[in-house]
Image (tube, helix red, strand yellow):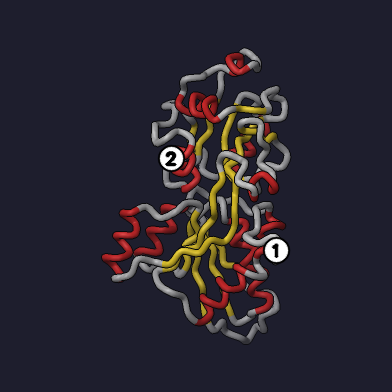
Amino acid sequence: MHKIAIGMLLIWIFGWNCHPQTRPAQIIRMKGSDTMFILASRWAESYMKIRPNISIYIEGGGTEQGIQALINGSIDICTASRPLKPNEVQQIARQYNKIGMSYLVARDALSIYLNPANPIKNLSLIQLKKIFKGEIKNWQELGGTDSEIQVLLRPPNSGTYLYFKEHVLDGENYREDSRIIPTTEAIVQEIDKNPDAIGFGGIAFGKMITHVKINDISPIEENIRNDMYPVIRYLYLYTVDTTTGQIKAFIDWILKDGQRLVQEVGYIPLWINY
């Protein structure tokens, strides 16, 4: 599996069944959410097999970087794990005299990751807020071992970082000594070897570690679809304007046939029957 460098990896996924003498009729550039990187890559790989005249670039780096790339015109589609901020909409409006287009493409839950050796399997939203603000600093306060809680975070340009801050911390600041880890995959790897660490990210990551319950509710598909799990979000695509041509065809495919890949990667498709 590929590894994403800190906000900078650029991959060019090319259709393997494209004739070597055939030049691609169109290039589609996507950039943004680390949470969506693997999913977007799977979409690109599958779509280019059925549309060999299309070449799709996928770049990670975080939702904020994707939105800025959309604003400056260097990409066609931004992948994002949060809604646009008002100031980002204003930037698009100033630049293009348009407010941008939003597409819901999948559902996700923010999972809380723990090492399987940690005896804690359930946390309340209040406890999570106190942990990530630094008001609870030892696992013993929660019924665990007498060891310091080590908080791992995505970088501030991550949509996941901002979403958790807004919806769990109520906009308050994270614990000052939290460790910033560049990607969700790297957070999972660190927690897998560190029993005292805690982090969060999409449900599609970290199958080998513990995804704890929040308020006694597991982050599973049924609970997400029924809006029972406390921290649920949508994953988005953004464009500057209403799409046409091959970009429209690609997004239309994502919203229909591409939903199968949403489920295969580990997120929740928009439709039960797709």
**Residue type for callout 1:** Arg
Classify the position of the C terminus by image quarter.
Answer: bottom right
In the picture, measured across the screen, residue 143 lies left or right of residue 158, that is right
Which quarter of the figure has residue 269? bottom right
Nearest the camera: 56 or 267?
267
Q: Secondary structure at mark 2?
A: helix
Q: Residues within 10 Å of mark 2 (few under 14, many from 20)?
A: few
Labelled disc at residue 204 = none
The residue at 31%/70% (across/down) is: 96
Quick check: marks 2 and 1 in contact, CB under 8 Å?
A: no
Residue on which disc 2 sits: 166
Q: Secondary structure at mark 1?
A: helix
The residue at 36%/63% (across/down) is: 71
In 3D space, how far apart are the residues under numbered discs 2 and 1 (Cα atoms)?
A: 30 Å
Can residue 74 be seen at all in this image of the molecule?
no
**Residue type for callout 2:** Glu
Which quarter of the figure has residue 176? top left
Number of numbered discs visible in the structure rendering: 2
- Earlier sequence position, callout 2 versus callout 1: 2
Residue 119, compared with residue 112, is above or below; it is above
Residue 162, compared with residue 93, is above or below; it is above
Can residue 268 be seen at all in this image of the molecule?
yes
Percent position of residue 195, x then y: 66, 25
Residue on which disc 1 sits: 260
Nearest the camera: 1 or 139?
139
The residue at 61%/14% (across/down) is: 140
